[in-house]
Image (cartoon, helix red, strand yellow):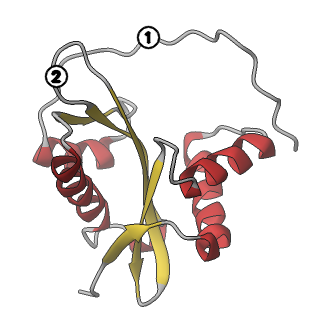
Amino acid sequence: MTMIEIRDAQAGDEAAWRDLWAAYLAFYGVEIADEITDATWARALDADSRLGLRLALAGGQVLGFAAHHWHLSTWTLGPDGYLEDLYVAEAARGQGIGRALIEDLMVLGRARGWARLYWMTERANETARRLYDSIATDDGHIRYRMVLQREPAARG
């Protein structure tokens, strides 16, 4: 197995991340406006932003990412870490990269005082759920979401 390096995104990673981001959005069948992707990338590089972006590399090639942030909790003294987006390039799946990205966030979260780390996935995403079930316990919650403000429309 190839050695996997995990590190924070750097300015020179933008094109590789954007390729993976586009594949991630296609996987979920969604389109978002370019300005949202631009803002996500800018936030990921901003040291004052709560949004973090960890990249998994092998042989110098970016093969996956984990976008995460933290927030205060009413249930714990420390903040919670939220893994918002996790993606591994299709050709690199099955090599432990997704697990490595989550384990990296566990280490990072402990170092930063997070009380918990959590994430969500679609019920039908059986491949991801097998990985997640081997790492953590489904806590039985169901997510509800409503739109409060309209985002810019994706261009096509």
Residue 127 location (% of width, % of height): 31, 49
Q: Is residue 113 above or below residue 138?
A: below
**Residue 2 visible in this rendered orientation of the protein:** yes
Residue 6, image x, y percentages: 34, 71
Depth check: give the residue in front, 78 or 61.
78
Q: Is residue 40 above or below residue 9?
A: above
How far apart marks 2 and 1 lie (CA) works out to: 15 Å
Q: Residues within 10 Å of mark 1 (few under 14, many from 20)?
A: few
Q: Is residue 117 above or below residue 152?
A: below
Helix or strand or loop: what does disc 1 sit on?
A: loop
> Which residue is nearer to you in this view: 93 or 78?
78
Q: Residue at x 50, y 66 (%)?
A: 9
Q: Amino acid at mark 2?
A: Asp
**Disc 2 and disc 1 in contact, CB within 8 angstroms:** no
Q: Regarding mark 2 in the picture, which secondary structure is present there?
A: loop
What residue is drawn where x is 81% and y is 29%? 152
Residue 144: mark in rendering:
1
- Residue wearing tag 2: 139
